Amino acid sequence: MRKLFESISNIWKIPDLRRKIFYTLLFLTLYRLGGHIPLPGINLKALGDYFSGGMAGPLQMFDLFVGGALRRATIFATGIMPYITASIILQLLGAVIPYFQQLQKMGEEGRKKITLYTRYGTLIIAALQGWGMVMYLRSLQGASGSVVAINDAAFILLGVLSLTTGAAIIMWLGELITEKGIGNGMSILILVGIIARLPNAAFQEIVMVAEGGRSIIELIFIAIVIILFTMAAILLSQGSRYLPVQYARRVVGRKVYGGQSTHLPLKINAAGVIPIIFAQSVMFLPQTFARIIPQGVFSNLLESMFSYSSFVYNAIYALLVIFFAYFYTAVIFNPVDVADNLKKYGGFIPGRRPGTQTSEYIDRVLTRVTLPGSIGLALIAILPILFIRKVNFSFWFGGTSLLIVVGVVIDTLQQIETHLLVRHYDGFMKKGRIRGRR
């Protein structure tokens, strides 16, 4: 514990790290403030009356991701999901369309163009999603009247414009966090939205125990289940397969270089929490589409099929998690580049010829280790749904939210750890201590 407090105090001794944390906190504060500005024309009392009984289905998960902004009908109700969806579309296009493949290989210039297209796509998706939300809000009736207090035409126009503008601001804040702050801006915004609901979820559990709705034994059982799922999420984030790497010995003059043995770590979940976020953003689309189309048999069937507890929803969700785990791993890890770098610096995997044979071997091993990692990720995401239905504990403690919280926190702490070690400060972990320094 003492070492932990020392590490936290060391953070503020590094000007660059201190500045990054300050910017991150500033942008997160702006994000939370925007999550409390209601849309124009909303009857807040009727809205509160309608949602007093809570939300159901995928909308509840979506509201969790945006920190309750949908429940409050704020300008940030779309959250970061339009930006994530646009990023998915651009990455998929990069795998099948030569033009986008060329952009991905153009370096910084190509990255700027892809970012520009992603921004345009975000605005289009945000407008469509905003339209679905406006249609949804128009249909709500609270105890004190309609949720919408102005005429339909004005509310639709102002609502879609406000939600699209809010999505653009969120996208801007996420990019600023990534550029000037610490951690991945997209993931941190989702993390903050989830954590914002934690106090309310904990309070609900306390109230249920106090009112006799849940026994202490059940509460202890729930706590054990949460701890086990958290441990599984940490193991998935940290588990790796190590490939031995040998560097050839070279004699230059009287000095001998190389001859060292090391390893190449291949994570079983190299994609982190991105597959969960991507899959969840895709699963929100059917519900959004059901709100846009005229209400009828088809829209009701679509909503029932993609309700949070349905078999169809969970089966598709699990398959999407596995798919995006492989897809994003292929995006961020290129075996050919790794093999070329090993060959360039005189490294090789014992028993494998440098070059093509090494890249094929790395790709084969990575494919195999990603399979259990992706399946484990999918199981942790969907299994807690059974506990939510059987035990009726707070929706916040679902596998999806736990995976995102654990993954983003570990990733952010690792970045802070790197800053500390580079500046010759002790990190959070004992294994991160730099030996042999004064």
Image: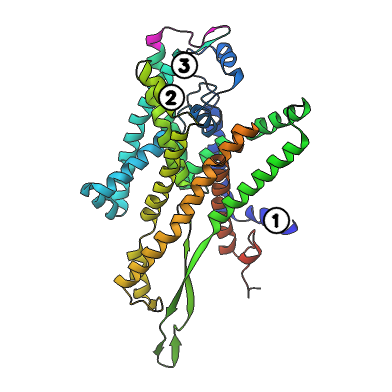
Task: State the residue position of label 3.
Answer: 137
- Look at label 3 and name its amino acid: Leu
**Boundaries of the magenta span:** 144-154
**Do tag 3 and tag 2 residues touch (Cβ < 8 Å)?**
no
Q: CA distance from mark 1 to mark 2?
A: 47 Å
Residue 303 badge? 2
Q: Closer to the N terminus: mark 3 or mark 2?
A: 3
Residue 311's place in the image compared with 183, above or below, is above
Estimate how packed mark 2 is, as few (under 14), some (14 to 19) or many (20 or more) residues with alpha carbons within 10 Å.
some
Q: Amino acid at mark 2?
A: Glu
SS assignment at label 3: helix
Q: Position of residue 15 (x, y in %)?
A: 58, 53
Left or right: residue 49 compared with residue 123: right
The residue at which mark 1 appears reads as 4
Q: Earlier in the sequence, mark 3 or mark 1?
A: 1
Q: Is residue 99 visible?
A: yes
Relative placement, left or right, of 22 versus 8 is: left
Image spot of residue 46 (x, y percent): 56, 11
Of labels 3 and 1, the one closer to you: 3
Q: Is residue 168 left or right of residue 146?
A: left
Where residue 426 sits: x, y (%)? 65, 63
Q: Nearer the viewer, mark 3 or mark 2?
A: 2
Q: Does residue 430 lie above or below 154 as drawn?
A: below
Please state which of residues 115 and 63 is positioned toward the viewer in this rendering: 63
Q: Residue 435 versus residue 195: which sits nearer the camera?
A: 195
Q: Is residue 124 left or right of residue 257?
A: left
In percent of the image, x 28 and y 44: which residue is there? 93
